[in-house]
Structures are given as C-alpha cells and as structure tokens.
Image (spheres, coloured by chain):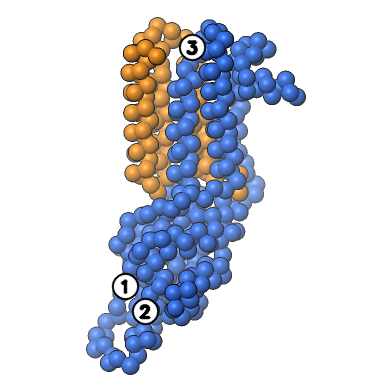
Amino acid sequence: MRDFFYCLVLPHSKNNHRPSLLHHKILFLIISFFVLSPFFFSSSINPLGGKLKAYAEISVRELLEFTNQKRIENGLKPLLSDPELSEAASKKADDMFAKNYWAHNSPTGATPWVFIKESGYNYVYAGENLAKGFNSSGDIVNAWMASSTHRANILSENYTDVGFSVKSGQLNGEQTFLVVQEFGSKSVLPLAQKSEPKSQNTEPVRKVLGFELASSFTKPSFSGSETITLIVILSFISVLFIDLILIERKKIARIVGHNLDHAIFLGVIAVIIIIFNTGSIL
Amino acid sequence: MNRRHLTYYIFLASLLFSGLFLIISQNPDRELQMMVVVGLSFAYVLAGILHHLINHDLVAKIVIEYVLIASLGIATAFFVFKGGFGF
C-alpha cells in the first residue's frame, strides 16, 4: 500500500521515473470518470440533475426567516408571506427556465409586474430580487444584504408582503437552481406615513430597487462535488511540482512535456471552477 | 531558464490569463464559459506542441500528454458544469 502510494505520487525506477498519477492510462481513467459520472449520478439520483443537496438546503421558510430577521434588526416590521406573491415568484422562475434567461425582464419583454398582476396581487409597491448558484438560504440573504439595491428592497418600508420560489432546472445549459423573491404592498402608503395625505396618483408605483443593478457575484460556496474536483486538481499540481523538483535534483533525462506548463494550466482550471461556484444575484 | 523558454512562458501565461479574463467577463453565462474552457484547452495544446516543435523535441508521447492534461481540464470543468455527483 505504501509502495503503491509512493509510485502514485513520486518518480521512481518502478514507475519509469514518472509518478503513476501522470501516466497516460491513469490520466485517461480519471478523465473518463469526470466525463461520465455526471450522467450516471444525475440520472440515477436526481431526475432534475445535480445540486440535489444544495437545492434541499434552500427553503422558503428559511428565506422568509432570514429576510425578516434582517428587517427586525433594522427596526422594521417583518414581512408576511403572501400566497399570491409566491405564485408570481413561482411563475417567474418557471418562465426563466422555459425561456432560458437570467434577467428581471423576459426576452419577450414581460416585466416582473406581469407575473405579480397575473397572480391576482393588486400591488401599489412591488420589487424583485433574484439569486442563483448558491448553496444555502443564509448565503443568499447575506449576498442580497451586501448589495445596496437588493438590501434596499429587503429593508424597504414600502413593502408589507413577500413571496418566494426556489426551483431547480437547466439555465444556459447549466444545472442550477433559482431563487425568486417578490415584494409587494397593497397599501397606498407605508404604515409609518398613514397620517399623511393620500396620493392622488391612481397608477400603481412600480419600484424595483435591484432592477438597475448588473449581475454581481459573491463568495463561492462549494458543494461536495466541487470540493472533490478541486482536491483532485490540487493533487495533480502538487505531484507535478514534486516530480519537477525530484527529477531536476536527480538529473534524470525523460521525454515528457513541461510540468510547469501543466501546473499553470491546471491552476487556471482550478480558478475557473471556483468562478463556476460563485453565486450571482440580480 | 533560457530566453526561448521565458518567451514561451510569458506567452502561455498571457494566453491563460486572457482566457481567465474572458471567463470572468462572461459570468454568469456558464455555457459560454464552458466553450471558453474548451477553446483555452485547445490553445494550450497548440502552444505546447509549437514550443516543443521549435525546440526540436516533439514526439507523439508529448503530444498525448498535452492532450490528456487539456482533456483533464475540460473534464473537471464539465463535471462541475453538469452538477457533479448531485451533492
């Protein structure tokens, strides 16, 4: 076992002075494993594809709890969960998956207000926050709170109701899950300002504070699969450097590619995987 | 490290960091990012082959090694892109 491990990571006469991990057959096996396993696991474990655990860790109850916690901390009244706004959020998430877009407005021009109106919620104030690619409810609310416009939506006195939807599906070819948060208020004015004269404007006020913001990104949150992938890549980089140092010391001539090239390339791939796991809000 | 190697490493680093910049600029469009990963891996193989060709030490074994390392890069990115093991 010890010999096997040494041969796997160290250059030795038993492995032709090249760590077994870098041998073509082993590399081919590892590549095949990474290419085939998503198809095997996604079809056998979860019909919706990957991120099953991540999906399970995000719940509407928690999102409402964390949102209201932030409001209470800032001296505001908690929002009430509204079934009509939840229905609007659900329809918005379905529409994003069906038409394959990541935006407040659909490619056909439908604004968030269309979904809110269709659900039967007669709003005066309305707002929308979106998130995708996160692994927990807490991370999502924290990401929104870190963005000034999304934070303003969460801490707005204008809203009294909220609705959430958490859905998993394919977006731009990626297996992901979306979180839609719809805010609304049926009151003409915020409760704190009820003594003031009522507005003469009969048109509903449409206000989405997160709307003008381009996608922003937060710290990556890794699932088990991503952690395993990063460990494999870092192991390869380590073995390449160990091999480089030992062969240089022993002055052994070999016909192989440059280890430094491979290490730099795999390092860039590791950074890309970290970027892949960066949740985004809109 | 001789001058030729240094030039090659500067070129390789520029190539990879340009790809990385492209990937960051395309966030969060994962499909496009995945295409950039594939393109970047092809460019990496070509750069490696050209370098060894200039150094007159290009053999099939080296080409296979570059192709396999590039494939490992694509495979790991694809694995994460497709949702991995589902957890």
The chain coloured orange is: B
Q: A36 or B64, which is in the foreground? A: B64
Secondary structure of the residue carrying tag 1 is loop
Secondary structure of the residue carrying tag 3 is helix
Q: Residue at x 54, y 18 (%)?
A: A245
**What is the chain identity of the residue bearing mark 1?**
A
Locate residue A142, reporting x and y percent. 47, 61
**What is the chain identity of the residue bearing mark 3?**
B
Q: Name the colour assigned to chain A in the rendering.
A: blue
- For this orientation, the residue located farthest to the right is A1
- For this orientation, the residue located farthest to the left is A200
Residue A131 image-quadrant placement:
bottom left
Q: Which mark is residue A158?
A: 2
Q: List the residue tagged with mark 1.
A: A207
Q: Residue at x 33, y 69 (%)?
A: A208
Q: Residue B34: in sight, yes or no? A: yes
Locate residue A280, reporting x and y percent. 42, 54
Which amino acid type corresponds to the residue marked 2 in the rendered image? Answer: Asn
- Image position of B18 (left or right of A278): left
Q: Residue at x 46, y 34 (%)?
A: A269
- Image position of A209 (left or right of A12): left
Q: Disc 1 vs disc 2: which is toward the camera?
A: 2
Q: Are marks 3 and 2 on the same chain?
A: no
Q: Which mark is residue B60?
A: 3
